[in-house]
């Protein structure tokens, strides 16, 4: 079970990572559109392949609108920004067709991995999701992506379907 404390998606929060670097966790807004487009165009291919479980989508105005024009209730995203304000990670959830469920996805740039950033972002999103009426997250990743599997297991998630991709479910709670 992912634990949480009530937070607002509208607020920013500073978070210290395991290596003592700090990031600001901020809500994604339409103002992030250009930075996100640049990040998608310049991300390493393995990161994009792992995130999208295959080829990354083409960066189009419609995609950027979908990724940044959020209601922060059924579709929510937060960015992690370094001391200079540059985005170093993004985490999002989107409601699924199942009542109470939202699919989560997290992408962290390589220099910021394995220091607790994805976990911190997931916890913050869980708090927002619970406040918005969700009771579980689902996640999908490529079968060989062990770092994601470890993070999901540590959050109490259990695999519900395996194959070339692995699907997980985790209950959100207080």
Image: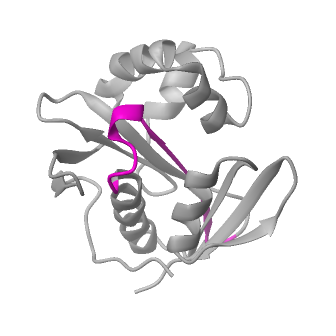
Residue reaching furthest to the bottom: 174
* Residue 5: percent from left, percent from top: 28, 77
Name which residue lies at 72% across and 37% down: 53
Is residue 131 positioned above or below 31 on the image? Answer: below
Residue nearest the observer in this picture, 116 or 174? 116
Let me know if residue 109 appears in the view: no
Single out the residue that lies furthest toward the right.
Answer: 163
Q: Count of labels shown?
A: 0
- Any part of residue 124 in sight: yes
**Colour basis:** one colour
| Residue 7 placement, left or right of 121 | left
Say which residue appears at 29% left-offset and 56% top-offset.
9
> Where residue 44 sits: x, y (%)?
52, 20
Residue 83 is left or right of residue 154, and the answer is: left
- Residue 16 location, quadrant: bottom left
Q: Which residues are magenta?
A: 99-116
Magenta stretch encompasses residue 114: yes
Asked where in the image residue 6 lies, by quadrant, the reply is bottom left
Is 28 in front, or is 155? 155
Above or below residue 85? Residue 157 is: below
Q: Position of residue 150 (x, y in %)?
A: 56, 63
Q: Is residue 25 magenta?
A: no
Q: Quadrant of residue 113?
A: top left
Q: Compared with residue 13, is residue 130 higher up or lower down, i.e. above or below? A: below
Residue 82 placement, left or right of 171: left
- Relative horizontal placement of residue 142, taking residue 20 as reference (left or right): right
Task: Name the quarter where the C terminus is drawn.
Answer: bottom left
Where is residue 136 shown, x and y percent of the image?
58, 73
- What residue is shown at x 59% (from left), y 20% (from top)? 45
């Amino acid at each position: 079970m992912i634990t949480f404390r009530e937070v607002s998606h509208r607020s920013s929060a500073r978070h210290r990572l395991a290596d003592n670097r700090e990031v600001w966790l901020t809500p994604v807004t339409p103002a992030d559109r250009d930075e996100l487009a640049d990040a998608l165009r310049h991300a390493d291919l393995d990161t994009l392949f792992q995130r999208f479980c295959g080829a990354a989508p083409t960066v189009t105005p419609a995609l950027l609108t979908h990724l940044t024009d959020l209601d922060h209730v059924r579709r929510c995203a937060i960015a992690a920004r370094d001391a200079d304000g540059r985005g170093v990670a993004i985490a999002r959830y989107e409601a699924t067709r199942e009542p109470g469920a939202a699919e989560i996805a997290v992408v962290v740039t390589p220099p910021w991995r394995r220091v607790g950033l994805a976990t911190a972002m997931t916890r913050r999103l869980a708090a927002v999701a619970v406040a918005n009426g969700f009771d579980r997250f689902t996640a999908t990743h490529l079968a060989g992506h062990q770092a994601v599997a470890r993070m999901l297991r540590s959050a109490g998630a259990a695999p519900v379907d395996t194959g070339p991709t692995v699907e997980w479910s985790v209950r959100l709670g207080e």
